[in-house]
Amino acid sequence: MRRKLLSCLLTIACVSSMLAGCGSSGNTSGAADTAPAESKTEAVEGTGTQAAEESAPADTSSVNATGTVYDLGGLKLPICDPGSVTLTYMGNDTWCAGVSYNDGTAVQKEIENRTGVHIEWDTYSSDVETVLQTRLASLEGLPDMVEIPPFDSNVGVDTYSSNGVLIPLNDLIKEYAPNIQALFNKYPALEAMCTSSDGNIYALAGWWGDINDYVPDYLYIRQDWLDNLGLEMPETVDELYDVLVAFKEQDANGNGNPDDEIPMATKNGIKQLYYLMTGFGYDTNSLWYTDDNGEVHYAAVEDQYKDMLAFLNKCYSEGLISDDLDGTLLTQNITEDKVGIVCHDPADNMASSDDLALTSNPECDYEFMPVLQANENGTARMTKRGLTWHYYGITSACENPETAIQWIDYVYASEDGLMLYNYGIEGMSYEYDADGNIQFTDLITNNETYTSAFSALRSIGAWPTYFINDSGEAFMKIFEGTKVETACKDAYGNMEDPFPEMLGTAEESEVYTSVWPDLSTYLDEMFTAFVIGTESLDNFDKYVETAYSMGMQDIIDIKGAQYARYQEIVGK
């Protein structure tokens, strides 16, 4: 997830020669028919953008497509005469073992067929940030399009816009990217989190605003263990404690060994146990939050938070929480049928955890837990995962920024591009049944090499790591008819929006980058120390005092100013 950044205004010259060969006049062989009337519309449904609504249907007569061409939202394909423009992209490689964008995938080739734009891929599966930072710092050999480091923060957007690496995209979007503009109109939060303090957009954020409406990220629990012991699903802290004790003492997995159960473990480190904070009076499980007056708070330095730490320390001292502090052994322990509750994991991972545990116990059944409440009448709700993740921009080295933004508009925001993104290629990875519903092919559902649908889709280039815009509807289709779908439907419309991660001013970013790395490390280390008992909770006030001496108030003030800017943009 991301954080802040700085700012600076750049200008670009739109030279007519850059447009040579671009437009919809290209002529390629093997063109596919356009989509059926019911799936081919002039504007993306629900966007409400006047520009898209008034645009004429796209001319796709010269598009070389393998399957159906869907709504283009006013964009014309091909973008340029096929092969007349080559763009370079640098960033993360696929998340599929043995598959690289550098070698080409079916979806990448299909995108090139449709857009006419050739992409030279320069992607990496390891040390990506180091490679990117080195390249961007040198200001030499810049790619046309880039994933912006550091990935766990958004400060890179200001860094590389201030030094001239990234160009502003506002005018390009307005003139050449109707689908991005429609996406901004549909999701004001996205535009807000792409907008720097100077009002310019230097990068587009990977957007999880749609999929995270569907996918809860919380705790899941062994329902079969609850059933074995005659226990109800825990809904309060006291009930959770009783369940954890029973899991530890009553041979919950039924293997005859009462000492091998791990009542609760974490996926991404013990600090993720803060997800339990709703059980101690917080409205959501977000460390950053606002009160009724709009004032920004950070929960980890508040007295109320101490109660949760005391509970976690009690649980850890009694062996109810795994001592695998970094979660390194979680997969192994799940496979060995030892883990009762997994803390901080999205709902879809229940399925993979089931698959792991089933190798030891055919009765394994992980189910999503309800949000812990402070009491039986509690109204706390879980927070959605972050809305944005990683940023992507066009560099000053790009000689065809108009073509680049149109290509981005296609893959990132058009319906046709997102069909390739989320479902792959019609006839290869999906087909329509007699009722017009999408059905995945055996390549996706019965792939011997890539057993999960996600991996199978990624093996052909779908669900990419670049210009992310994941679809909740497509996600639900992948898990149709499973308990993951049930958990997601239960959560849909019942989650709080996360605290927005806005881009910072130059001053904010300077303070943030000088303060937050050390401060956040200290906060995490003290959380662990309080939980495992190497630091007494008698020193909690001293811990808070130290956090403020390290700049906690400065960070809270920055977050407050950014939240105010977010409200101003979203409410405009």
Image (cartoon, grey):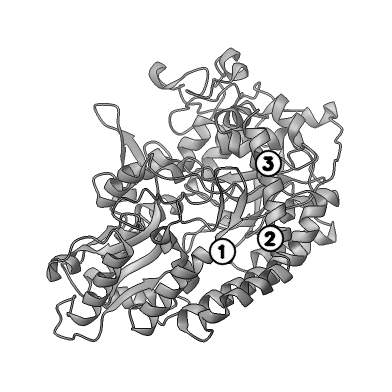
- What amino acid type should be assigned to the residue bearing mark 2? Pro
Dot 1 crowding, Cα within 10 Å, few <14, some 14–19, many 20+: few
Give amino acid for label 1. Answer: Glu
The label shown at residue 302 is: 1
Quadrant of res 235: bottom left
Nearer to me, 544 or 32: 544
Name the quarter where the C terminus is drawn.
top right
Total of numbered circles in the picture? Answer: 3
Image side of residue 511 versus residue 389, left or right: right
Sequence-first tag of 3 and 1: 1
- Tell me, yes or no, if residue 529 can be seen here: no
Q: Secondary structure at mark 2?
A: loop
User: Which residue is identified by label 2?
Assistant: 150
- x and y, in percent, of residue 212 in the image: 45, 46
When asked about the image quadrant of residue 155, the answer is bottom right
Return the disc, 2 or 1, that comes first in the chain's sequence: 2
Q: Amino acid at mark 3?
A: Ala
Q: Position of residue 290 (x, y in %)?
A: 57, 48
Q: Is residue 521 left or right of residue 508?
A: left
Q: Is residue 123 above or below residue 191?
A: below
Q: Is residue 187 visible?
A: yes
> Is residue 505 found left or right of 559 in the rendered image?
right
Asked whether the residues under the numbered discs 2 and 1 touch, taking CB atoms below 8 Å apart as contact, a structural biologist would say no
**Real-space Cα distance between discs 3 and 2?**
25 Å
Between marks 2 and 1 in the image, the one whose residue lies nearer the viewer? 1
Q: Residue at x 77, y 66 (%)?
A: 514
Q: Secondary structure at mark 3?
A: helix
Picture layout, residue 339 above or below residue 191: below
The numbered disc on residue 564 is: 3
